[in-house]
Image: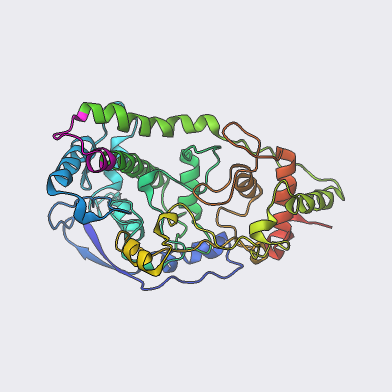
Amino acid sequence: MIHTISFTESRERSVPANAGRDHRSRLYGARAVCVGTLLVISGCFTSGPARFRLNTEGRDAAEITSAQREAIAETLEELFGMPDAPKVPDDVTLQLPLLQRAAGPVCGNRQGNQAGLYRQHCAACHELSGGGGGATAGAQNPYPRDFRNGWFKYTSTAGGAKPTREDLDRIIRNGIPATAMPSFERLSDDEVDALVEYVRYLSIRGETELYLLQLVVDEDEYLPLDVDEILEDAVVPAAESWVVARQTEVVFPPQPEYAPGELAASVERGGRLFLSEDAKCFQCHGESGRGDGEQSELYDDWNKGKKGATPGETRKLARRYRLPVQRLRPRNFTEGIFRGGSEPEDVFWRIHVGIKGTPMPAAGRAEGNTGVLTSDEIRDVANYVRSLSRKVAGTLRVP
């Protein structure tokens, strides 16, 4: 058996503007959370049962009584188990064998099968509970994702829908350029599947936890709780939202083979739309796409609640959050760094369905969206945005 002890880096490493997939692959170990790994030959390491941390983000933790904490913890444990022994609630389609491979302490067997994948690859940033406040999170910009409220930025689904399995798979394999999220393309398909399933598990559990906090703390629900009612009212709806997300998936139309001059015309049309009052891309990204638009005081949904009107309120709010408020920076397209991916389909989806939990709206016309652009117009804007980067424009072959 093998277990690992990881040493985390103290600050985020910068990524060159020309960092592509090959570069991310070379930096797989260096840009990951661990800068060194000590392998100890023994058994799987244990130091007592691991526990999920109660989600008190935005709340005064001192106002939650011990009885309330105990009721919430016991209900969640009965439904979802513990970090070392996850459970799948009734009527939820999560796959327990995948969860068991991702959960628990880091260890492996003689056949080379690795367990504890989430703690090995994810917990130092996203923390054990999936709250995004891991040991290295404070040094990162943007912060790691908090999975517990069910918001995910980069999806192919319209409206407020959850991502598909393929969306999560793509992020894990490719990473997110110019962030501390590395590429895990060296993991096997089974390992990626296990991590995808565990992220879904943390999200469903997290949404249930938020429901319980509202019910028990805000509404002062009589204790003890009825677990069957919690299952019906919170767990099953949260789980079903992942299933129905597939119905809102926006299909990327095949990229056409452009005749001479057609691509340049598409880029020109996209530039006009970029500056139009309908699309309003320039308001955040600037007229030249350098991220210097007039709307610069921007925050995503993970940070909006942390803002205070006065310094005193800001300090008071800070005590209710693990990480301080962090402002959102619109993308500078000339740098050639597209966090959701730089391929045509990636940019198409970012424009069509937006970036969930951020001021980047969904511009596409689809059920659940209020967008103003057709698929053909979105393709033109995507071609224009990609043409602003020298690195990406080379693949466009614009005359």
In the figure, residue 180 lies in which quadrant? bottom left
Residue at the extreme bottom: 10
Q: Nearer the viewer, residue 37 or 154?
A: 154
Does residue 345 appear in this view?
yes
| Left-right relation of 335 to 61 | right
The scheme the figure's colours follow is: rainbow
Q: Quadrant of the C terminus?
A: bottom right
Tell me where residue 346 appears, x and y as whole percent.
60, 48
Q: Quadrant of the N terminus?
A: bottom left
Q: Nearer the viewer, residue 390 or 120?
A: 390
Q: Residue at x 51, y 63 (%)?
A: 24
When the figure is inspected, residue 93 is found, relative to residue 363, above or below; the finding is: above
In the rendered image, residue 302 lying in the magenta stretch gets the answer no
Q: Nearer the viewer, residue 68 or 231?
A: 68
| Left-right relation of 7 to 392 | left
Residue at the extreme right: 261
Q: Tag count in the figure?
A: 0
Tell me where residue 331 appears, x and y as whole percent.
60, 61
Tell me where residue 309 appears, x and y as whole percent.
43, 62
| Left-right relation of 18 to 10 | right
Tell me where residue 112 appears, x and y as whole percent.
30, 51
Q: Which residues are magenta?
A: 213-227
In the rendered image, residue 223 lying in the magenta stretch gets the answer yes
Q: Residue at x 36, y 30 (%)?
A: 237
In the figure, residue 145 lies in which quadrant? bottom left
Does residue 137 appear in this view?
no
